[in-house]
Image (tube, rainbow, N blue to C red):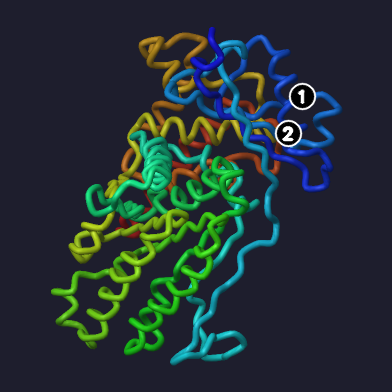
Amino acid sequence: MNIARRPKLHVEVRKFRSSQWSTHSIAEAVQRHLEGLRTITTGGLLTDLPPDLSTHVEGIRVCEVEGHPEKKHVEPSTVQPQYHVYTLETFGPSTEELGPGGATGEGDSSSIPAATHWVLPAVEFEGLWEALVYDSMIKEQLMKFVEASLVFSDRGTDRVVVPWNKVVLLHGPPGTGKTSLCKALAQKLSVRLDPRYKYAQLVEINSHSLFSKWFSESGKLVQRMFSKIVELAEDPMALVVVLIDEVESLARARQSSLSGADPSDAVRVVNAVLTQIDYINSFPNVVIFTTSNISGTLDLAFVDRADIKEYIGVPSRAAIYMIYWSCVLELQRTGIVESSETLFSFRDLETMNMIVNEATKLSMKLLEIAEKSEGLSGRTLRKLPFLAYAIHSPCPALHLPLPQYLHALQAAVDKHHRDLSTLGATK
């Protein structure tokens, strides 16, 4: 096959910070290793690295084949690997503080934590992208959205003729992974867009703080917060990702705000947000991700500025199964659950027409548990595998037989439903 026609296979290589090898040397070594394999499985980490490579590389993640996300097994000769070599930042987040009036807030007891700031790729978000499971192709769509924005900017497309704002709005009930998806995407972009950008930064704006402590100054605080973001964006070699979680705190519909305690200030906040988004749109290296649990209260002018408005609902049976499936695989990897028996993926079960036999009985048991879990949020689903071990298994025993653990998981799901009914709570 002609090299130019081979589809790209994205390979992410996590380099030890202590390694003296150049990016090029590491890419060449990984290339030699992959060429020695008969087939490559996508969507997972490569283990059993040769000694010369393992001293410089922490891990190799074989990602998707570009344009063919359904391909799970590929031959090295049929793809064109694209290597993304990176090191993780371990500094942890810093806090951006603002005070009343013109104060910076630093060291001031009256200051507020206006934003949390990470340098990416950060160790806190490693593996988060792969752990998230959705029913739609939202992850792939968001990656394409950012890539398209860069193409339009690079080609000098006239924004007056073809406007785009680089603003994403994810909305839906709490606990469905909206904020996690934004952080995971920021991390993924920091890896994939290197060396286009020398470094990446994630700024998560604390919208509740900006709108609470000095209510009459909220509009000014918004302006000052975005001024700091502009300072970051003025470096063309920096990718700046802005996350506004629960954006309804800052962009509530102005008509409904008129009935509030200080309607003029509420309107000023919305106006400030809209003005700053319009201004920051001129920087090609800035993208804005927003989330909302109650999107019906958002100002229509803000909603109109969002290029993508995606609803993130509770997972379907298939997504729930894959969430549980990934959790069980991790417990098997760490030796908490025995790995002698395996579970099929949901796609494998579909291929086999959901037939029940000796080979699939445990997988079908997990599917039954997934059906009983329908309606639960992703956040809850991720907690249940831990609770199954902590409460319904002989903790701290290791190497639990898989049938025993699945029985414990079902018990955890049943108990969760009972607890909800006694609380009268939402799911």
Q: Amino acid at mark 1?
A: Asp
Q: Nearer the viewer, mark 1 or mark 2?
A: 2
Q: Which mark is residue 24?
A: 2
Q: Quadrant of residue 160?
A: bottom left
Q: Nearer the viewer, residue 198 or 307?
A: 198
Q: Who is closer to the viewer here, 122 or 278?
A: 278
Marks 1/2: CA–CA distance: 22 Å
Residue 269 location in percent, x, y? Answer: 29, 78
Residue at 21% over, 86% down = 264
Residue at the image point whose x is 38% and y is 48% from the top: 176
Q: With respect to residue 190, does 73 lie above or below?
A: above
Residue 427 visible somewhere in the drawing: no
Residue 36 sits in quarter: top right
Instruction: Judge whether 368 appears above or below 193 on screen.
Output: above
Q: In terms of secondary structure, where does tag 1 sit? A: loop
In this rendering, would 356 be left or right of 107? left
Establish if 423 lies above or below 357: below
- In the figure, 271 relative to 129: above or below? below
Residue 112 in sight: yes
Q: Residue at x 57, y 72 (%)?
A: 95
Q: Which residue is mark 1?
A: 48
> From the viewer's perspective, is 197 left or right of 395?
left
Residue 300 rendering spot, x and y as whole percentages: 18, 62
> Residue 339 versus residue 50: which sits nearer the camera?
50
